[in-house]
Image: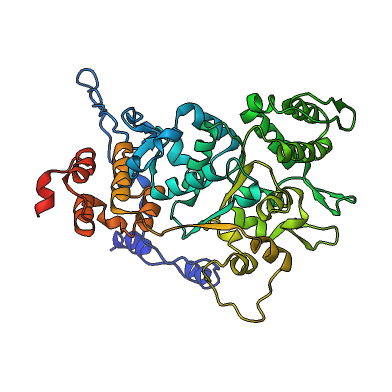
Amino acid sequence: MSGLLPSLGRALPSASSSRAAAFSTSALVAAAPKMGAKSFAKKKSPSKRQGPSPRVKVHRLKLTSNLARPAPDMSDLVQLFPESIIAENTAKLSVIPRKTFDVIQTFGLPAKVDKDLTLGAPATVIRQATLDIVKALENGKDGDSKEARYMITGERGAGKSMLLLQAVSYALESGWIVFYQPRASKWVNSSSQFAYNEEKMMFDQPEAATDMLQKLLSVNRKTLSKVKLTEDVVLSDATVKKGEGLDKLIDHGLKEDSDTAVATLDAVLNVLSTQTQFPVLFAIDEVQSLFCTSKYRRPDFKLLEAYNLGMPRVILDLLSGAREMKRGAVLTATALSQTDVLPSDSLIKGLGLPIRRTMHAYTPIDETYYNYANSGIKRIDVPFGMSGHEAVAMFELFARKGWTSNSEYQVSSFIAFHISPVMLSSPVMLMCSDYDLGSEAIRRIEAPLGLASEHLHR
C-alpha cells in the first residue's frame, strides 16, 4: 500500500498545483508534443560515385528565324533597270540593283517594308501599276512640274509605298536629281526644333532643312556639281560665286549653323526650279500627314497647321503648283497604315477620295488644305488586289525568302490579294481555283514551296 502512494502522487495533481492552475494565464492543459524536425528526417546516405560522370548529350540547335537563314539566291531574277520595266516583265520578280538600293537607304525606307527589303536581296514584283507610274514620269521628265503632279492612292496594303520606291529606283537609274522622303510624318510630329520667321510669317525647321540638304547632296553630288549657279548667292557669312556648282552652295550652307540651312535650302530650290539640265523628282510618302494639324504648338499652346511649317510648306507648294520646276515631277503617296495621321476631310473632299466616314454640310473643312488638294493633282489609284500572276510572283518571293505565314508583310499582302492567311498551307490550290494561271505559273510557285503536283488534284 505504501508502495502505491508515490505512484498515485505522481498521477494526481496536488492541491497547490490545482490552485495555481486556476490563476494561471497560460494553458497548462497538456498538448500533444510537437514533432521535432528529426521525427521525419531521413538519414541521407552518402552518394557513391561509380566512375566518371556521364556526358551530357548535346543536341544541335535548329534556328528558324529569318535572320538565321542564309540569304536566298536571287541572281536569276530581273534587275530593276529602266529598260527592264516593260510589259514583258509584268508580274515577274525583280531585284533593285544593289548600288541603287544602297543609295535609296541613304534617304531611309518606309517603315512597313524596311525589314522585308533589308533581309536578303531587295526583291519586288513589277506590276502593271509600276509601268503606269514610270510612263507618267517618262512623259513628264522634259516638261514643267506643274503638269506632272501625282498622288498614289488606294486601300491599305495595296502596295503604294513599294510602287513609290520602284519609281525612285527608276529615277536614280535614269539620271534624275532625286529627293525622297519615305516618312513625311516626321516633319509634323514635333520631333525637331522650329523657330518663327517673321519675314515669311511661318515657322522654320532648321534641323529638318539640314537633313534634307545632307541627303540631297549625298545622293546627287555628281549631278549637282554640273548644275552651275547663274548668279552670286549670299549666305550669312559667305558668298558662293556665280558659276560654282550647286554642290558647293550646299557645302557652304552645311558648314554654317543650322539656321543658315533654311536660307540655303531656299536658294537650292530656286536653282533646281529654273535649271533644265536634269529632271528633278520629289518623291514623298505619307503625304496625307502634310494635310493635317501638326503636333507642334505655338507659344500660346495652340497646335500649328502643317502649312505653317517650313518643310511641309515646300512640298505643298510643289504639289499644288504654287512653286514650279521647269523640268521635273512631284510624286507622292498616301499611307493608311499611319493611323494617327489618316487623310483629313479637307484632303478627301479636295482630291475626291472615297469617303470613309460620315461627312455633312457642317463637317469642318480647312480652306487652305482644300485648295492645295483641289489644285489639279493627278490621282494614280492602285486597285485593291493583284492580278493572279502578280500574286503568284509574290508567293514565289515568300517561298524564296522562307517567310512564314505569321510574317507581318506576308499577312498584309494576303489581305491585298483578297487571300486569307489560313490558305497558305495550300497556295497553289488557291491560285488554281481563283485564277486561270496555266501550268508554267503553277510550276513557278510549286517548286520553291516544295509542293508535289498531286496537291493540285486533291
Name the side, left or right, on which 143 lies relative to 30: right
Residue drawn at point x = 39 percent, y = 43 percent? 126
In this figure, what is the number of numbered marks? 0
Residue 437's x, y, as percent? 21, 51
Residue drawn at point x = 53 percent, y = 39 percent? 168
Residue drawn at point x = 37 percent, y = 49 percent? 410
Q: Is residue 58 visible?
A: yes
Picture quadrant of residue 397: top left
**Quadrant (top left/top right/bottom left/bottom right) for the N terminus:** bottom left
322 or 253, which is in the foreground? 322
Q: Is residue 112 visible?
A: no
Residue 416's x, y, as percent? 38, 56
Residue 298's x, y, as percent? 82, 58
The chosen color scheme is: rainbow
Picture quadrant of residue 453: top left
Residue 63, placed above or below residue 406: above
437 or 37, which is in the foreground? 437
Considering every residue shown, the one lying at the far top of the view is 51
Residue drawn at point x = 58 percent, y = 41 percent? 141
Name the side, left or right, on which 160 lies relative to 95: right
**Quadrant (top left/top right/bottom left/bottom right) for the C terminus:** bottom left
348 or 420, which is in the foreground? 348
Name the side, left or right, on which 393 lies relative to 20: left
